[in-house]
Image (spheres, rainbow, N blue to C red):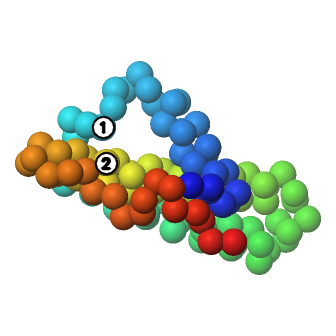
């Protein structure tokens, strides 16, 4: 499967963030309910980051490129955290299927091409 450039870029953001936290261990032993709580927290943090970005765009900060860049980066970091927790939930759920003797869940065949 050929990934869209945007998906490939975002996957690299996700992997970079995961690697920063490798010392904490993986997520395979985490309860889905705990991951769901963390996901909700990250969604709140992302909303706040977006709100701060909008405020920076609306005010005199428009001419402060360093501040605007930091606000943009914060939104990307929080969106990455949201995606990572969602991925962890999906991965653990898929692992649960295997534990119950079911084939791993695959929504898209590996050889399917991404639309252009």
Q: Nearer the viewer, residue 93 or 81?
A: 93
List x then y, in percent, for residue 109: 42, 59
Task: Residue at 20% x, 51% y: name it.
Answer: 103
Q: CA distance from mark 2 to mark 1?
A: 9 Å
Q: Are marks 2 and 1 in contact (CB under 8 Å)?
A: yes
Horizontal and vertical percent for residue 87? 39, 52
Q: Quadrant of the N terminus?
A: bottom right
Res 4 visible: yes
Q: Which mark is residue 79?
A: none
Characterize the local packing of mark 2: few (<14), some (14-19) or many (20 or more) Cα atoms within 10 angstroms. Answer: some
Q: Is residue 10 above or below residue 62?
A: above
Task: Please give the residue where the numbered disc 2 appears in the rendered image.
Answer: 91
Q: Is 58 placed left or right of 74 in the picture? A: right
Residue assigned mark 1: 27
N-terminal of the two: label 2 or label 1?
A: 1
**As drawn, 52 above or below 35:** below
Give the residue at x 67% y 51%: 9
Give SS at disc 1.
loop
The residue sitting at the bottom extreme is: 58
Location of residue 58 in the rendering, given as x and y in whole percent from the top left corner:
77, 77
Q: Residue visible at 64% across and 51% down?
A: 8
Report helix, strand or loop for mark 2: helix
Residue 116: quarter of image:
bottom right
Q: Nearer the viewer, residue 38 or 88?
A: 88
């Amino acid at each position: 499967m050929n990934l869209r450039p945007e998906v490939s870029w975002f996957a690299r953001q996700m992997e970079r963030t995961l690697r920063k936290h490798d010392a904490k261990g993986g997520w395979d032993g985490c309860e889905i309910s705990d991951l769901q709580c963390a996901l909700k927290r990250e969604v709140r943090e992302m909303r706040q980051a977006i709100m701060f970005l909008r405020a920076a765009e609306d005010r005199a900060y428009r001419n402060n490129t360093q501040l605007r860049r930091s606000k943009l980066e914060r939104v990307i970091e929080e969106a990455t955290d949201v995606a990572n927790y969602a991925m962890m939930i999906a991965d653990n759920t898929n692992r649960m299927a295997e534990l119950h003797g079911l084939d791993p869940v695959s929504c898209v065949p590996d050889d399917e091409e991404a639309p252009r």
